[in-house]
């Protein structure tokens, strides 16, 4: 059992026990409020950092030894920016994983076919980019996964099982919904923070390169959430790919890291 999950159970048990013992004597005690507040904060941290294993198993890195990393791209496809990423990957003989949004797949099925034809891996990022996804029910998560999977299958004939929730957050409900949809949640070991309009490409590249190591899963974006700006990763990607080559690391699909 992951340590984060075990500690959640122990912290919950301790807080409930303290609540039961303290309530008749000091229902408004500061200590009790702090204990319950700490429990809420810890439980929230597990949602924001799914790789800790608090609510389920999320793959955040591969086993070292193969000299491989997985570059992953969220929020596409987009006819301009995704194709720019594909061209850079082709020039460096690199493979990547694209976690796509279902409604964009329906809008740009030709781009999805290009991703697949180039030998890259397709993953699911939800049908809409719902920022409250982790609050939704398991059935909602399952439907989002299945709806997006169907859209991808119609576009290029593959039915992905890899899933990264919108924003990357995953609650107990998210994990259960993914399980119902036979999907595996993919987290990350390197977050580039390239999805902000104000992100600087040089800083994004440096942030990623400083953490590049065997087995890493790198979170990047090939499109903005609302397609209203170009993610900094597009300009940062050439430098990242050069660093991979210099360090003797191959960029592969996430599923190859699991082997």
Image (cartoon, grey):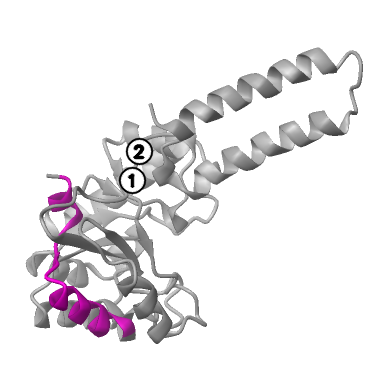
Residue 66 in the image: state x and y as whole percent. Answer: 10, 55
Label 1: state its secondary structure: helix
Look at the numbered discs 2 and 1 and tell me whether their residues touch, using CB distance below 8 Å: yes
Element type where label 2 sits in the image: helix
- Magenta segment includes 244: yes
Measuring from the top left, give residue 221's x and y in whole percent. 35, 70
**Where on the picture, by quarter, is residue 250?**
bottom left
Camera-nearest residue between 189 and 111? 189
According to the picture, the residue beneath numbered tag 1 turns out to be 145
Numbered mark located on residue 178 in the image: 2
| Residue at (61% x, 27% y) in the render | 11
User: Position of 78 compared to 50: left or right?
Assistant: left
Point out the stretch of residues depicted in magenta. Answer: 236-258
Task: Determine whether 166 is above or below 20 in the image.
Answer: below
Q: Residue at x 66, y 21 (%)?
A: 14
Residue 155 shows in the view: no
Front one among 243 and 97: 243
User: Which part of the image, by quadrant, shows the C terminus?
Assistant: top left
């Amino acid at each position: 059992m992951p340590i984060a999950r075990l500690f959640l159970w122990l912290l919950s048990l301790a807080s409930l026990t303290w609540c039961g013992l303290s309530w008749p004597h000091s229902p408004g005690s500061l200590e009790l409020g702090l204990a319950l507040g700490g429990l809420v904060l810890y439980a929230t941290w597990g949602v924001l950092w799914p790789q800790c294993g608090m609510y389920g198993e999320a793959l955040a890195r591969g086993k070292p030894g193969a000299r491989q990393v997985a570059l992953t791209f969220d929020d596409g496809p987009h006819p301009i920016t995704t194709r720019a990423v594909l061209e850079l990957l082709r020039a460096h003989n690199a493979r990547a994983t694209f976690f796509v949004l279902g409604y964009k797949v329906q809008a740009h099925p030709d781009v999805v076919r290009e991703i697949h034809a180039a030998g890259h891996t397709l993953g699911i990022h939800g049908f809409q980019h719902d920022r409250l996804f982790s609050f939704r029910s398991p059935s909602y998560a399952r439907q989002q996964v299945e709806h997006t999977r169907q859209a991808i299958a119609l576009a290029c004939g593959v039915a992905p099982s890899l899933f990264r929730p919108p924003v990357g957050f995953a609650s107990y409900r998210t994990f259960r919904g993914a399980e119902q949809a036979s999907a595996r949640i993919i987290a990350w070991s390197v977050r580039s923070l390239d999805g902000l309009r104000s992100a600087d490409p040089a800083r994004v590249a440096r942030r990623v390169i400083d953490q590049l190591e065997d087995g890493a899963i790198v979170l990047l974006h090939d499109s903005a959430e609302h397609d209203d700006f170009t993610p900094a990763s597009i300009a940062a990607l050439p430098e990242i790919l050069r660093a991979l080559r210099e360090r003797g690391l191959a960029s592969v699909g996430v599923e190859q890291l699991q082997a």
